[in-house]
Amino acid sequence: MHDQVFQYAPTGLLLFANTNTGGSSETESWVCVMANPSSENLLAQSISAGQSLFEAFDPTITSQLIENNTAEFYNSSNSTWLKLSAEKDQDKMVISINDITEIKQKFLQEIRMTQMYKALSGSLSDNEIILFDQDFNVIFSEGQPAFIRIPEDTILGKNFKELIKGGRFSYLDSYIQKVFEVSKQEVEHEIEGMYYSCSMYSSMIDESSDKPHIGVILLKDITEIKKKNAEIESLYQKILKSNQELEDFAYTASHDLQAPLRKIQSFGKLLKDRYALTLTGNGIQFLDRMIEAAQWMGTLLDALLSYSRATRSDAIFEKTDIKQILESVITDLNIKENSEGVRIEVSGVWPEMDAIPLQIQQLFRNLLDNSLKFSNEKENLLIRIVGNLQEEPQLMRDNLRISGPHLEIVFEDNGIGFEQEYADQIFQIFQRLHGRSEYSGSGVGLAICKKVVENHNGTISAQGELEKGATFTILLPIEQI
């Protein structure tokens, strides 16, 4: 009867007998007498009669078993954790074998989770981290400084909802109620002049459990961040106001100075027409220089007025066919494809996009004017304009990565070009690489191009090589946010 119970027991059982006659060690003196089938299944090997304990198990395991009557080990043969328990009765020893894989995995999971959250709390030194089960009982709490834990020495095992009830953080109660029902919640709250942010979410840790989720709270004092953000916002608004005042001043000044300038030009012309013969010495030469200077000042004021208009970003964006605008500008400038000395090639993909049509028109006109002005006398001018849809360009602006579909426009010509070291300078207002006697213009055209592109939240860059030509690359977002 006893033999049948032994053989058919679901628990693995090994019967050992002590054969110690004084000449062998204790581990060697215990010899297997009988092993039931369950032990063979659990161990993934058979232990036959006559095998010593030392032969049956690893020396470390046998030592623990003899000293403590118990031992745990990982059986790599079948990827299980096993527990051996020894019961001795004089010269007999029964070893029971139990599969503790599930218990061990839960235990190791708890250790890993604790280590993970301790590491997390260490890396987030300004956060208080609290974990609770689905009954809202606290199972973990770390982090400095402590907010909810004051004045409690420990809150482990206590109900989180009771801890915050009636206190400074009682406002969290309505959010905690929903933590297992909704996705992550982010809350900012002011308490007595201090600002706190709280992130709340749930995480599954044990699918087999009837309550598999835990709640997670990250609580942080963001008072200093709020103050800094308020200071930055205040400074930003001051800069915006200052820039607007400068734009208004430039617009008003360039507009209001036109009237007295026209009088200088008119009276200068009258003086020359009526009294040229009465002027002596260098008089007529001085008068010509004055008239020329007034004309140049008029050119600069017109350019400044155009630039001021371009800086005003109050225009409304609308869906625009910018290829049609480009073709219209080419027609207005009386540039025809294959006309004498000039050839323009327009190709590529040109999707509709959000744009300010008048500003885009100004952009294309100034770029074409630039190519025409700085053409190379040694060969016919060739201007290539290519549109290309960029789904996700690697675009940086103000140290931020900009994503989303963009239209890339490449203007390329074979004109006189420029040295690459001046690639940024050419976009600055009134900056010229050549004297007025060599090439006409005010030095504002490319500055306006840059301002138009910035108004469209895009970028513009230039590459050049002397006597080889220049290339301007523009990236404009398809949709304005």
Image: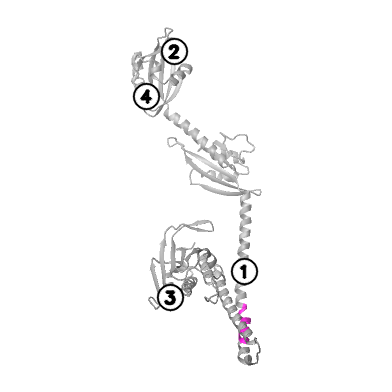
Q: Position of residue 98 (x, y in %)?
A: 41, 23
Residue 266 in the magenta stretch? The answer is: yes
Front label number (3 vs 2): 3
Q: Residues within 10 Å of mark 4 (few under 14, many from 20)?
A: many
Which of the two discs, 2 and 1, labels the residue nearer the N terminus? 2
Which secondary structure, mark 3?
helix
> Number of marks in the image?
4
Quadrant of res 102? top left
**How would you classify the magenta stretch by its main secondary structure?**
helix
Q: Secondary structure at mark 2?
A: helix
Image: 187 above or below 41: below
Q: Secondary structure at mark 4?
A: helix
Question: What residue type is disc 4 on?
Answer: Leu
Q: Pointer 3: what residue?
A: 330
Q: Secondary structure at mark 1?
A: helix
Label 4 and label 3: CA atoms lie apart by 86 Å
Q: How is the protein colored in the picture?
A: one colour
Q: Label 1 crowding class (10 Å Cα cut-off): few <14, some 14-19, many 20+?
A: few
Q: Which one is in front, 435 or 193?
A: 435
Q: Is residue 470 above or below residue 198?
A: below
Q: CA distance from mark 4 to mark 1?
A: 85 Å
User: Residue 71 in magenta?
Assistant: no
State yes or no: discs 2 and 1 in contact (Cβ < 8 Å): no
